[in-house]
Amino acid sequence: GASLSRDGKHLLLYKQHGWNATDVYYRPAASKEAFRPLVEGAKAQFSVLAHKDHFYVATNQGAPNWKVLKVPASDPDFAKAKEVIGEQADAVLDNVQIIGGKMVLTYMKQAHNKLQIHELDGSFLREVTLPSIGSTGGMSGDPEQDDAYFMFSSFTTPWQIYKTKISSGETSLWASID
């Protein structure tokens, strides 16, 4: 598959090798040059999120529960990538997003989700308080806007949509099924 970064600067090309490995190639969107490998030939999965001048790479390489690496887009030498979110021993990283200038991580822990907010350098800010143990549909929002939304459900609660402020953690019910 292929994707264009939100700011329109980077093209990313993914080559899947079954369910176990991903090669990732990149190039500037305005360029006609050939795609260059960001990561190629590794026996692991990779998902890349381009934000401003960095690539945030979620991978299970050396981390079965996944971790996040950060590499400058101007010199994306994967060998120099810096780990910003380490693997958690008791939870699997399901999703990484940039919302409100922060990293929003969705984890699966003991058959329920948890949402965490981190600075772009990986430092932990807070966990988003969920109504109870249950599932989220991840979080949706703009990389530059403070407002974000997430869906939540549990065995006793149908899907509800919550609005949250990334900067403060203030969360309120936005929509529900009556």
Image (cartoon, rainbow, N blue to C red):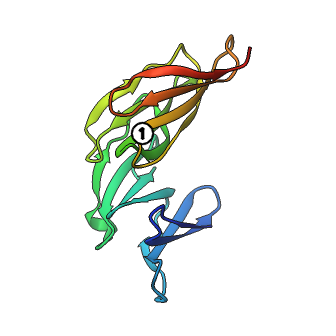
Q: Is residue 31 visible?
A: yes
Q: Quadrant of residue 9?
A: bottom left
Q: Please state which amino acid type lies under the numbered disc 1.
A: Val
- Quarter of the rendering occupied by the N terminus: bottom right
- Front residue (pair 113, 158): 158
Q: Where does residue 96 sit, x and y in percent of width and height?
A: 46, 45
Few, some or many C-alpha atoms within 10 Å of disc 1 (few <14, some 14-19, many ≥20)?
Answer: many
- Front residue (pair 140, 23): 140
Q: Residue beneath label 1, please?
A: 104
Looking at the image, residue 12 sits to the left or right of residue 126; the answer is: right
Q: Where does residue 109 sit, x and y in percent of width and height?
A: 50, 26
SS label for mark 1? strand
Q: Where does residue 165 sit, x and y in percent of width and height?
A: 41, 30
- Quarter of the rendering occupied by the C terminus: top right
Name the residue furthest top. Answer: 156
Residue at the location (35% across, 61% down)?
A: 52
Looking at the image, residue 27 sits to the left or right of residue 149; the answer is: left
Residue at the location (32% across, 38% down)?
A: 118
Q: Is residue 40 visible?
A: no
Looking at the image, residue 99 sits to the left or right of residue 45; the answer is: left
Residue at the location (68% across, 14% down)?
A: 155
Q: Is residue 25 above or below residue 110?
A: below
Looking at the image, residue 56 sits to the left or right of residue 4; the answer is: left
